[in-house]
């Protein structure tokens, strides 16, 4: 859907926004925000300046929006009255807000909070039209009076940030005001090798992130036991289909750039990983892991390997979850530390492979958080490359990057 059609869709399906356009406000959108440009105001010298309002859009469905609260962001300095004094009762204060390159002319500097009064009581605004009208009267009124400035320019800015990732609006990111952080993931092409318990939860987290592309690989079939270690709604028709086919169908209506294939990855799978910028290895066989490591290290793809080991202790389950990061520079050094099994145990066929859904999810959480730390989304006070989560005491033991002094 083109940018212009996004503009027209929002205007035609939302009466309050349509009324703003019809009155002449310079309405535009930036994916999750309503922008109203061409707002005149007076600076501290009573000179004419121009600013813009920005307010959050809360999508109730792909075509309809409501306002989150009574506040607005503003791109100018603090506005002044005709008497040369700052306009009072605007609340808020200085702030910033990351918008997309499509709105590069809009640089938010402050946030205002001014509720209207009805019969002496503070109330919220019924819709976007009432809110923009109110703030325009307060902020633009003095400039309109002194300079004859007009906020009703009938200028529409129909260029909207192209959201090529998601098939529905990501309003969570705008509500949290972390668009600039999510942008750090946009160039990533991520592979998930193994879509079992932990891999399935990793997929669920990554689908809802801003990574550009996700490639998943698993040839195994989806059986009943998988349903107990799998996020999402179960459809009985999924049984005996490949995990790749099951999860492709589950998430296909959520985002673009999702390619899940019913195949195994080994040292010969060069083409499948072409262009991949990061990988998660979620396999439980040492021999499989060894071939995958060979390929990832040879292709200089950084990756995280996950694993868990559970056993019975005093009538209950105990064990550890592991997350190990292999950077391009230190992958071989990390591998030499033998933190992950690289061969199959002689008694493998008699081994009980215990996995529990919440532990798979926890393993995936630790892995996705580490990935986002590496990309600058989360703060990383003491960078580590190896974590062990102990079930018995809920403690996490971590080690610094391979090659560093590990005590």
Image (cartoon, rainbow, N blue to C red):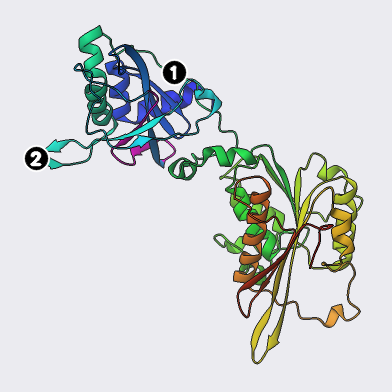
Residue sitting farthest toward the bottom: 314
Q: In which quadrant will I find the N terminus? A: top right
Dot 1: within a 10 Å radius of its alpha carbon, few (fewer than 14), some, or many (20 or more) residues?
some
The label on residue 224 is none
- Residue 379 belongs to the span the image colors magenta: no
Q: Which residue occupies 50% across, 25% down?
A: 160
Nearest to the observer: residue 107 or residue 152: 107
Secondary structure of residue under mark 1: loop
Q: Is residue 25 above or below residue 163?
A: above
Residue to which mark 1 is pinned: 157
Do callouts 1 and 2 mark residues in contact (Cβ within 8 Å)? no
Q: Is residue 293 visible?
A: yes
Of callouts 1 and 2, which one flags the residue occurring earlier in the amino acid sequence?
A: 2
Q: Which residue occupies 78% across, 43% down?
A: 276
Residue to which mark 2 is pinned: 120
Q: Is residue 38 above or below residue 187?
A: above
Residue sitting farthest toward the left: 119
Q: Which residue occupies 61% across, 65% down?
A: 361
Q: Which residues are magenta?
A: 61-76
Q: Nearer the viewer, mark 1 or mark 2?
A: 2
Q: Label 1 to label 2, Cα distance in Å?
A: 38 Å
Secondary structure of residue under mark 2: loop
Give x and y (percent) for residue 7.
44, 24
Give x and y (percent) for residue 26.
36, 17
Q: Is residue 39 above or below residue 326?
A: above
Give x and y (percent) for residue 107.
46, 25
Q: Is residue 217 visible?
A: no
Q: Which residue occupies 85% across, 54% down?
A: 331
């Amino acid at each position: 859907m083109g940018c212009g059609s996004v503009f027209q869709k929002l205007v035609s399906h939302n009466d309050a926004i349509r009324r703003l356009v019809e009155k002449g406000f310079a309405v535009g959108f930036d994916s999750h925000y309503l922008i109203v440009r061409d707002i005149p105001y007076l600076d501290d010298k009573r000179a004419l300046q121009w600013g813009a309002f920005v307010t959050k859009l809360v999508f109730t469905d792909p075509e309809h929006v409501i306002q989150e609260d009574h506040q607005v962001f503003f791109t100018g300095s603090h506005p002044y009255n005709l008497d040369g004094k700052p306009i009072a009762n605007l609340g808020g204060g200085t702030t910033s807000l990351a918008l997309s390159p499509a709105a590069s002319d809009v640089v938010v500097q402050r946030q205002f909070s001014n509720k209207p009064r009805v019969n002496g009581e503070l109330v919220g605004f019924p819709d976007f039209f009432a809110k923009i009208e109110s703030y325009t009267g307060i902020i633009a009124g003095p400039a309109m009076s002194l300079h004859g400035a007009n906020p009703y320019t009938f200028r529409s800015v129909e260029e909207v940030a192209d959201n090529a990732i998601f098939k529905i609006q990501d309003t969570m990111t705008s509500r949290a005001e972390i668009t600039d952080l999510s942008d750090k993931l946009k160039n990533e092409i991520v592979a998930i090798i193994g879509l079992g318990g932990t891999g399935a939860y990793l997929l669920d987290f990554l689908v809802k992130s801003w990574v550009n592309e996700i490639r998943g690989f698993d040839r195994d079939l989806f059986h009943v036991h998988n349903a107990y270690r799998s996020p999402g709604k179960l459809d009985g028709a999924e049984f005996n289909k490949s995990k790749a086919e099951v999860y492709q169908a589950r998430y296909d209506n959520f985002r673009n750039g999702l390619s899940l294939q019913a195949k195994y990855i080994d040292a010969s799978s060069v083409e499948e990983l072409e262009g991949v910028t990061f990988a998660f290895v979620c396999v439980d066989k040492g021999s499989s892991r060894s071939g995958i490591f060979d390929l990832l290290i040879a292709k200089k793809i950084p990756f995280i390997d996950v694993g868990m080991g559970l056993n019975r202790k005093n009538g209950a389950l105990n064990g550890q979850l592991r997350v190990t990061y292999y950077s391009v520079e230190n992958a071989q050094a990390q591998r030499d530390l033998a933190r992950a099994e690289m061969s199959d145990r002689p008694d493998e066929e008699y081994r009980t492979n215990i996995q529990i859904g919440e532990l798979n999810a926890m393993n995936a959480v630790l892995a996705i958080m580490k990935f986002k730390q590496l990309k600058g989304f989360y703060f990383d006070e003491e960078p580590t490359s190896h974590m062990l989560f102990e079930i018995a005491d809920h403690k996490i033991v971590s080690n610094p990057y391979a090659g560093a002094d590990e005590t």
